[in-house]
Amino acid sequence: MNNDRTEVHSNLDSVFHWDYAVKFPQLDRLYENAKRDQWNVSTTINWDRPIEREVLDMTMMPMFQTDLYRSLSDENKLALNRKFAAWRLSQFLHGEQGALMVCGQLVDAVPDLDAKMNAAAQVFDEARHVEGFRKYITKLDRIYPIDPTLDRLLRAIMEHDRWEPKYVGMQIVAEGLAIAAFRFMQRETKDDLLKELLEYIMKDESRHVGFGMLALRDAVRKLNGKEKKDLEEFSFLACDMMVTKVENGVPRDGFLSGNQVFEECGISMKDIEDEMHRNPAWAEAESNLDRQFNSFLFVDTIIPCLRQLDLLNAHTEPWYKQLGVMEMASAA
Ligand SMILES: [Fe+2]
Ligand SMILES: [Fe+2]
């Protein structure tokens, strides 16, 4: 075991494509846009600006209303603000590295050349996103380890030996997660440098979802019954992985998986659980925030895409209903 790296195994086939004619003019146009929209992390953004002392607007966080938060020293309040931002941004960074590698796999495995070239353009976009988040987090604080939920999702996508599930997992589900998380972060940050970085990255990400949808529409139509069923199941599994589970009234994973941050600011997991039991309104407010996030993620982003691809259909809709991700969050 080496803490600096993790190896993931996959039995993916690499495919040569010998017909060089443009088959999908829409994908060709998207490739042109990808070239036109390149930007340079080190020169497009002015990195000489200092980061705001308070990166996050804590008044928007449910924890702001708790005795636990009020009991912290000013120094620990500021540390919590910056470290919590660094922890969340570290998850973006790990997700970007996952995207970089999955896209590399797609270059190899997708059978059509137009799709290979778009995936190749995306590889460089994702490298740029890794560069941007790494640069920002190291300026802010430090890089935290990957959250277990994100780790499970990325591994499931990387280990799969077929390219269609990788496409859905990365281009629809993980890209959807990135867009929802970036939109949330943009709403919650007070820092202009971070807002600008997220703005540029989100423009690239929306192109990536467009690429996924174009390429997948054709691919899903070509699947046989068993392959289509497997893809439906994998798409649901990927969505299910991202929904925060609640145990004994306390949400698991989600923001609590950043427990290292709390401990560094003098808050133990026991302090958090005690406060949540003493103050159920806090647990409720965290769940509300989760619902708002899931509404951004599923209702606005992932579900319309899965429907268009016929992966959310009469057969699979009950699964998503049971997961509780089909309706708009009331507090959104
Ligand atoms: Fe990205
Ligand atoms: Fe992306």
Image: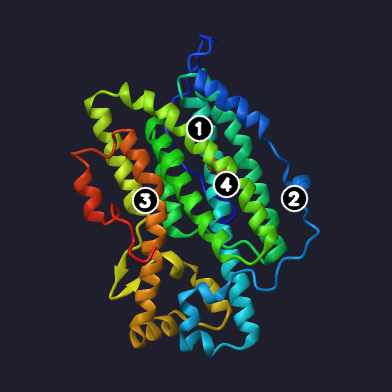
Q: Nearer the viewer, residue 263 or 294?
A: 294
Which residue is rendered at x = 41% and y = 57% of the image? 149
Above or below: residue 188 compared with residue 25: below
For marks 4 and 1, give the CA distance: 22 Å
**What's the residue type where badge 1 is placed?**
Gln
- Res 220 seen here: yes
Q: Nearer the viewer, residue 260 or 223?
A: 223
Residue 105 tag number:
1
**What's the residue type where badge 4 is placed?**
Met
Query: Circle 4 is placed at which residue position?
Result: 202
Q: Do labels 4 and 1 touch, CB within 8 Å? A: no
For marks 1 and 2, give the CA distance: 30 Å
- Residue 163: x and y, percent? 41, 30
Look at discs 1 and 2 and give the one toward the viewer. Answer: 2
Mark 1: give few (<14), some (14-19) or many (20+) Cα within 10 Å. many
- Residue 279: x and y, percent? 36, 85
Residue lying at the far right of the rendered structure: 48
Which residue is rendered at x = 35% and y = 53% of the image? 241
Nearest to N terminus: mark 4 or mark 3? 4
Nearest to N terminus: mark 3 or mark 1? 1
